Every structure is written in structure tokens, then in C-alpha cells.
Image: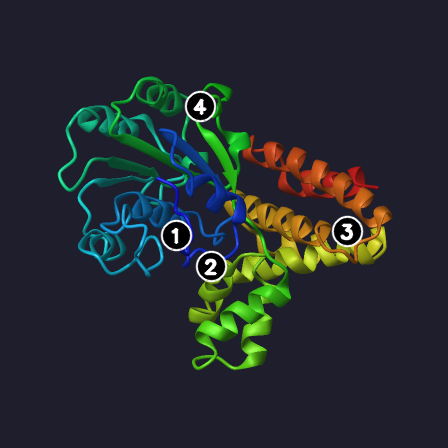
Amino acid sequence: MAVNNRMFLKYLYGNSRIKEIFSGSSVSHAYILEGPKGSGKHTAALEIIASLVCFTRNDSESPLPLPCHECPACKKIFNNHYVDIIYIDNNDKTTLGVDQIRKIKDTLYTSPNEGSKKFYIIENAHLMTDEAQNALLLSLEEPPSFVMFFLLCESSDNLLDTIKSRAHIMKMELFKEEDIVSYVTERYGSLYDENMIKKASQNSFGTIGRTISYLENPNNPEYEIQNLAISFVENWMEHTLSETLAFVSNDIIAKKMTKNEICSMLDYSLNKIGSSMTSSNTSKQSVKKMLKIVNAINIAKEQILSNCNQMVVLYSMVLNSI
């Protein structure tokens, strides 16, 4: 059923492409929602699911948006009480293993309880091991007609081609700082002053969720690594080679960060560069340099995860971007 003139996915900011896809009459059985942490993947999945089971879906005369957020189905979904949404997560582990994925097979053919569809949301799908992805493939290939999958991932590059070929990839939209400030001010302006919102948006890497998270908990240790990444990229882009290498030595290596912390910092650096590359004020010369840096970071991440010497890897990373 087409949405006609009803406001669709009202509570999902931007993301016009996603709204266009799901406002039509047909949907696929599997989708990959791709975007950095805080980009709204979870929100998008719940809004889409609610739009499919909302009690007002077939009421073309309804003045309410779709989903309406008022019917029993919507209330259960947004209060986390809808039993036909099954979450699969890594539970704070560094990978999402085959045991979690096998839970899908155990329930796959059980009919829905609430309505006509059942939904699997796989959080942090980019952390799935190859074994887990191959186990998931069996369920993705020929699921029952009432099953839909949502794979939420930071990068679909971490997914096997066989998984990506069986699901539609939808990238979450990233936003300019001024758009984030405008949105957050409208919704949370009574709780936070303008300067706090602006500072949070500068650390958001183009995501609304990260902005709100920063406002709610600015002392989260994660943001120390995030701020370090921002400073690192700024040094890399604006300062001399010797100054950048000095920053690596004095501000990164001296902190004796763990392997996972360094990889997180590098991921934040990639997000910061990605946000800068989309800016209309960025010159072609700067974009060319950023692409070199991105390539150097990706190589460094692989080496860090392979337990190579961190100091050697980080120095080489900077030198390889020249």
C-alpha cells in the first residue's frame, strides 16, 4: 500500500531515500542499514517496522503520520514490548559469533504472535565472524514470507558479498553541523544551552544520535578517544609532518592505548574525514590528501588488529599519507 499524502516516517530526520523506498507498496525480506554510530540505524529500523504493522496503515484517510505512534502496535514497538521483534546482538563482545546467529534458525519458522510479520534486528552486524555470516546466509536465502531482516552495521565492507547480494543496502544520511544544531535545538533547546549544543554537534561526525549522547553524558570515556581523533586529523591536515609525528608520540603513543582503543580512534578519524569531505568548503587538494589519509588509516587498522607494533604502525601511517 502506498502512503499517499500521509506524513511518512515523521520521526526519522532526513533520509529521503529510505522514506522513498518504504513508502511504496512492496518491500524486500532483508535490508542492511549502514552508518556510523549515532546515525539513526536503530531508529530507522523501528520506524520502518512500525510503519508496516501500524493499525492505521491501510487507512488512507487517517490524519496521523505513518507510523502513527498512537495505536497499540506502535506503542508496543516504541516501548520495546513488541514480541515479534527479535534482537540479535554481540552483547559487548568484540565479535558477533555463530551461536547468536543460530538463535535465528531456532525461531525462524515460528509464526508471528502480534501481526502478520516477524522481524529480526541484527545489531552491530559488521562484527559478525565469517562463520556467523555463513550461518546467517542459510536463513537469508529462503526465509518464510512473514520474516524480515534488518542488519545494522557501521560498514557493509565487513560483510561477505554473499550476504550483501541477498539484502538491500541503505546508507544512513549524515548531516551538516548547522542542520544538527537546528534539529537538536528545536527538540532539546529547553535542556541545553546553545554553546553546549554547538560543541556536541562538532563532535558528532554528522550524526544526530552522537550529538544527543554527548549532551547526555559528556564525561563518557569514549569521547576522550573521539576528541583525540578530531585533534589528530586536524594536526594531520593542517600541521607539518614533524608536528604530526610529535602529536602521535606525545598524545597517542604516550597514552599507552589498547589495540581496540587505537582502532576506535582510527574509526573516529575516518568519520571525521568523511564529514569534512562532504563539506562544500573543502578544496579538491584537501580531498586528495584526505583520500590518501583514509587509505593509510585502513592499512594501519589491519596491521594493528594483526598485533603489529603500534608505534611503528602509527608512524608509518602518517608517512604513507604524504
Going 32% across and 60% down the picture, which residue do you hit?
64
Distance (Cα) linking label 3 and label 4:
40 Å
Residue at the spot of label 2: 209
Q: Earlier in the sequence, mark 2 or mark 1?
A: 1
Apparent side of residue 147 relative to residue 224 in the rendered image (left or right): left
Labelled disc at residue 43:
1
Name the foreground residue: 163 vs 308.
163
- Work out how far the residue at label 3 is from the one at label 2, CA to CA, in angstroms: 33 Å
Q: Nearer the viewer, mark 3 or mark 1?
A: 1
Q: Is the Cβ of the residue at disc 3 closer than 8 Å to that at disc 4? A: no
In the picture, which quadrant includes the N terminus?
A: top left
Report the residue marked by disc 4: 163
The percent position of residue 187, horizontal first and vertical second, equals 45, 72
| Residue type at numbered disc 3 | Leu
The answer to whether 113 appears left or right of 186 in the picture is left
In the picture of the structure, the residue carrying the numbered disc 3 is 245
Image height of 93 relative to 77, above or below: above
Q: What separation in Å lies between label 2 and label 4 (alpha carbons)?
A: 27 Å
The numbered mark, 3 or 4, whose residue comes first in the sequence reads 4
Circle 4 SS class: helix
Question: Would you call the spot at circle 2 few (<14 residues within 10 Å), some (14-19), or many (20 or more)?
Answer: many
Rendered position, 186 above or below 132? below
